[in-house]
Amino acid sequence: MDQPSATNATQTFDPVEFETEPARYRHFRVTYDGPIATVTMDVDPSACIRPGYELKLNSYDLGVDIELADIVRRMRFEHPEVRVVVITSGNDRVFCAGANINMLGSSSHAWKVNFCKFTNETRCEIEDATAHSGQVYVAACNGTTAGGGYELALACKEIYLQDDGNSAVSLPEVPLLGVLPGTGGLTRLSDKRKVRRDLADVFCTTAEGVRGKKAVKWRLVDAVFPRSKFAEKVRARAEALAKEAAEGLPGGTRKPVILPPLAPEVTATSRTYRHVTLTWDDDARTATLTIAGPSEDDVALVERGGEALLEAGADLWALRAFRELDDALLHLRLNHMEVGLVLVRATGDPARTIRHDAALAACRDHWFGREVILHMARVLRRYDNTSRSFFALGDAGTAFAGCLFELALGADRFYLLDDPDQPVHVGLSALSFGALPMHHGMTRLSAHFYGEPESLEALADDTSLKTPEEADEAGLVTVLLDDIDWEDDTRVAIEERVSLSPDALTGMEQNLRFPGPETMDSKIYARLSAWQNWIFIRPNATGPQGALSLYGRPERPRFDWQRV
Amino acid sequence: MTQVSSVDLNSKIPNNVGLSDDPKLRRALEKWLPEYLEWWGDMGPSDFYDKPVFLRTAVSVTRDGWAHYDYVKMPEYRWGIFLAPPKGELTVKCGDEAGRPAWTEVPGEHRNALRRIIVTQADTEPASVEQQRLLGHTAPSLYDLRNLFQVNVEEGRHLWAMVYLLHKHFGRDGRDEAEELLRRRSGDPDKPRILGAFNQPCDHWLSFFAFTMFTDRDGKYQLAALAESGFAPLALSTQFMLTEEAHHLFVGETGLDRIIRRSAELQALDPNGDVRAQGGIDFDLIQRTINYWFSYSLDLFGGEISNNASDFFASGLKGRYREDKYEDHKALSGTYRLPVVEGGRLVEKDVPLRHAMNEVLRDAYVADCERALRKWNKTLEQMGSPTRLTLPSRRFHRHQGIYAGHFFDPEGNLISEETFEKNRRRWLLTPEDNDYLLSIMKPVYEPGKFANWIAPPKRGIEGKPIDFEYVKMHD
């Protein structure tokens, strides 16, 4: 067989675009029946995002997951009436066979890591929708549910498996491929479904998996139903869940908010959206990400309350700007691998952003207001998880305040200009104290002050505008520079940063960004992904005789038996 | 250790594997025995259990011992466990470890793969009994009735052979799998048998003969490939099963030959050459039957390009048909060329030989089927019939592998779904075909007499005359 090598050289292909829409789906069908939506996975084997492999048996690649992410996102905005989302398969025998192995085996390390990170983020979004949006995901596994297929099921609140003497759930990565079930599989097995660790050990080393009653007994699935009654039983469960999920929901007219394409203006060195601009300099290996704060009209609109937000729909600044930010981050991750440092700038009027946030926070009892804030939180988590250095540059004309101050707090450093002639104000807002949590459950502010609880205490509910000096005094600034030093000091800092090892920086940043306790989500990125990414570069997986390299080849793997 | 001991016929479970010296295993199998009998009672040809049938029973594994003929009532048939005696030093026959001594115990790293291979093979045995359970009511003769029951009891014994391996070598998982084998049911939407062809209805004798001709022949090639296994107990079990399987294939091949012969007679007899007008089975219908069962049977070999096939070969678990005829048992460097569908047309593609092992086995099978077709056409020629039957392309009407999801005509040309559907009734069995066949299939239980739609065999069984009372319908 021709060994695909497509994804080793990303740059020779068109950039990956993360935006899609239902009319363009190749791999999913979504049907709506009142409060129950059914997402049917039926992967088109020939529609791969890169050439060189076939998406057989409902296996997926990045292109498939981009569609899934789109479905999950649109479900919340465009189908607010939906309470239960049933994920099932259109394939006769297979629910989902997981990530395509030939794709993984032939991909560069960077592609694998980015692919896994994106799929992990989508799984976390599924759980976020279940937990916060009253959209409960249910996996209806009507066939073999293997590897990433079971991990997708694990992201759902409940898992139902067809009992036909054949369909099993499995995590065959270790015995078959010499890698981990890295899309949250191990973590959700232990922390979410609380499968006993010794049984989990047996399960994760048995390639064919577990089926039938044993799968229920081991808590791998919630129930098994015979094939002839499967659809009916799942339906009954979905209806019951829909009733439960409908309780205690926020109010407001449940009118769909359609998400139109962002359609940025693209040049060889920039992507320009309505509120966000991303430019890059490949030679300097830096990019600049600029986000413009809300206008006076935007604030006035939000101040009119939830129904007015709904009228504005996808044009709402808070939704549009953060969608753009999300797209820019994803573009940067996949299509500009060598850009190591992102200079972040927020513009606008800081006082206005703080007022905007206060008004938006007041709309949290409206379903759409809540969704907008939840979406902002997810995008900011994507920002935290992006393996680039971020320097927030608070120079003249910037406005790091409220939700945009999160970009400064989330950055690895915040440089702020202290120039009496060009005063740059910063400030916290109603959204700074819990509405936009990080993956490990803390606010960026409390993570920032993990070792200084008194500084955190001093800022409690403080949404006042601060001068650079006040901000520095409060501990919100990394380096305060006057006008004379700004140019040179930031230049040196930038040049120094881009000269350091990208691997070491990624590891260092990801350790320093998340002080304090872990959650299941953060363990998936910090523990599972970190181990997976190590295993991915080990010869036992990806060397010439590694299990992942040789999967699908006639030769069998040979391991270096040394435990490291 | 795999020890082939002398045959113990007096124990509850006749065997030559020294069961009496292994009380734990014996207890486990004796626990399975009543469950098996219950299954046999529910799903076997139970309406004929009080009839003495002239059956062949294996009483030893020597040349004359494995075929002992006598009247037996089916529930009293002695299902036993027999391994063929090993010929010389057993070795791993193929793959990376070819030439090393064979495994007598399951190697840990291959445990799951071996269990899967054995369960998949085992599942076909009870499945075919289930598919055929009502055919006794429409048997065209006592000779055929007896052959049906012979096939049935031997499929049961083959199940025993595989269950022995599961119990002996796979611990608790093996015992669980052995129980599951009795729980799945052919054609049951909730608990179907594992492989597609074993869930297809087989409700008349034309299908029965086609099944034993084409589907059991897949079994022969699977068993032959497993007889090359580096896992000695599996190799020795399947070698012995092959001796019995040959009879099933004989039943199928000669059964179809006798139908073809009779249809040719009726064709000549009828002024318009209309076989159906004479109450026979017309050649178009026979051709549709061949197309139907041949294509479903091809699916049983698995994907044309298969990681599993490569792994099984590489690890020495499953060889090629007559592996010893090959010189290179590693097959690491060769390629295999086959047509694949790419961009809406067929193009030739080279795949690593190991990945094509299913296709290599399928080649041997197709060649064997072609031989049978030549034989039947020879019969037609001898009978002066102008008709000739053909074997459809291996791409036609497939549900597994690289051709599934595409549409081909019986010659193997890529066609549209619309064209396929338009011709489906011309190419494949229809419900009306079944209605017609059931309408002409009335039982014939008188010794020496045969239904109108089938010719008598050339000779009887074990030297007995054709009019011998092969099944005693009346005491």
Image (cartoon, coloured by chain):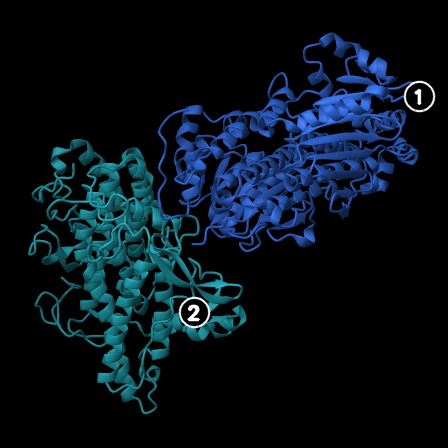
Chain colours: A blue, B cyan
> Where is residue A508, by image quadrant?
top right
What residue do we see at 81% from left, 25% from top?
A: A487
Residue A221 position within the rendered picture, expressed as x and y whole percent measured from the top left = 49, 35
Q: Secondary structure at mark 1?
A: loop
Camera sees residue B50: no
Q: Is residue A442 above or below residue B400?
A: above
B151 or A50, nearer to the observer? A50
Dot 1, crowdedness within 10 Å: few (<14), some or many (≥20)?
A: few
The span from disc 1 to disc 2 (Cα, nearest Å) is: 91 Å
Amino acid type of the residue that numbered disc 2 sits on in the rendered structure:
Pro
Residue under pointer 2: B431
Residue under pointer 1: A421
Dot 2, crowdedness within 10 Å: few (<14), some or many (≥20)?
A: few
Residue A161 position within the rendered picture, expressed as x and y whole percent measured from the top left = 49, 41
Amino acid type of the residue that numbered disc 1 sits on in the rendered structure:
Asp
Q: Is residue B420 above or below residue A126?
A: below
Determine whether, in the image, residue B400 is placed left or right of residue A532.
left
Chain where mark 2 sits: B
A86 or B338, nearer to the observer? B338
Residue B411 position within the rendered picture, expressed as x and y whole percent measured from the top left = 41, 74
* Numbered tag placed on residue B152 in the rendering: none
Depth-wise, is mark 1 or mark 2 nearer the camera?
Answer: 1
Determine whether, in the image, residue B140 is placed left or right of residue A396.
left
> Where is residue A238, by image quadrant?
top right
